[in-house]
Image (cartoon, helix red, strand yellow):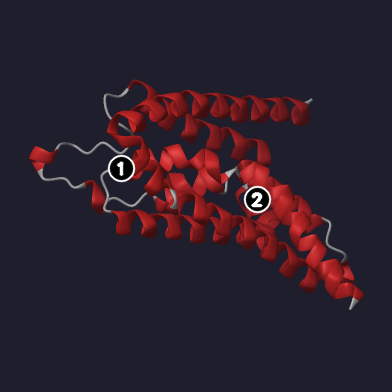
Amino acid sequence: MDLFFLSVRYVFVVAIGLLPIMNPLSTIPLFLALTRRMEPERQRRQAARASIYAFAILAAFLLVGNGIIALFGISMPGIRVAGGLIILVLAFRMLFAGETPAKTQGDEEGFEQHEADYSFSPLAMPSLAGPGSIAVVMSYGSEIPEKYEVLGHFVVLCGIGIVVACAYVALAGAVRIAKFLGEAGIQSVTKIMGFLLACVAVQFIASGIRDFIISFS
């Protein structure tokens, strides 16, 4: 019984530790920008897929993350820099384009945005399951005692599931936020959040470069 209560406690410890790093609220402006021309049902499907993909990515890195990194020779600083560059490109498009990053090639040409799928990239990765979230999950995995390895991984997976569920609620609620803000409001929020995303991207890149320098020195 003590082990059960201890496991439940650590589920919430993992969730509380991961939630600020994933920060689903910071993904809402990007989600709105990418899905603004989609039907509400399609938006909800995008939110569900992004959440499922984020859970799968974090679960994969929890279970076989060290093997993946060793196989491809990837370091955590490399993941940070790559994720930062992807976010930076999206942020620039949000800031300087006349439309949002989800702009189609033109309604006259018959391209419909509702055909696009942004759930895996950039919503799930690197926005939800970014370098910070991956690092946190792998650090929790490294602290699991050997005699409780199966239970420990299950506990961490439950914590990830809680955070991903919160992410889905936030993204699914973005549809109502869009209706409340209106077209002009979404454009304003997109510009503001584009700037903030650019700052986050620069921070990712800078921390990755710093870690590179530390590891080489």
Q: Quadrant of the C terminus?
A: top right
Labels 2, 1: front one: 1
Q: Amino acid at mark 2?
A: Ile
Residue 8 % position (x, y): 79, 67
The residue lying toward the viewer, choosing from 47 and 82, is: 47
In the displayed structure, 54 sits above or below 105; it is below
In the displayed structure, 160 sits above or below 182; it is below
User: Which label sits on residue 36?
Assistant: 1
User: Which label sits on residue 61?
Assistant: none
Mark 1 crowd level (few <14, some 14–19, many ≥20, 10 Å Cα): many
The residue lying toward the viewer, choosing from 101 and 175, is: 175
In the displayed structure, 57 sits above or below 99; it is below
Residue 171 % position (x, y): 46, 50
Number of marks in the image? 2
Sequence order check, earlier mark of 2 and 1: 1
Residue furthest out toward the top: 96
For the point 37% across and 28% down, which residue is it?
A: 94
Q: Which residue is mark 2?
A: 69
For the point 48% across and 34% down, which residue is it?
A: 87
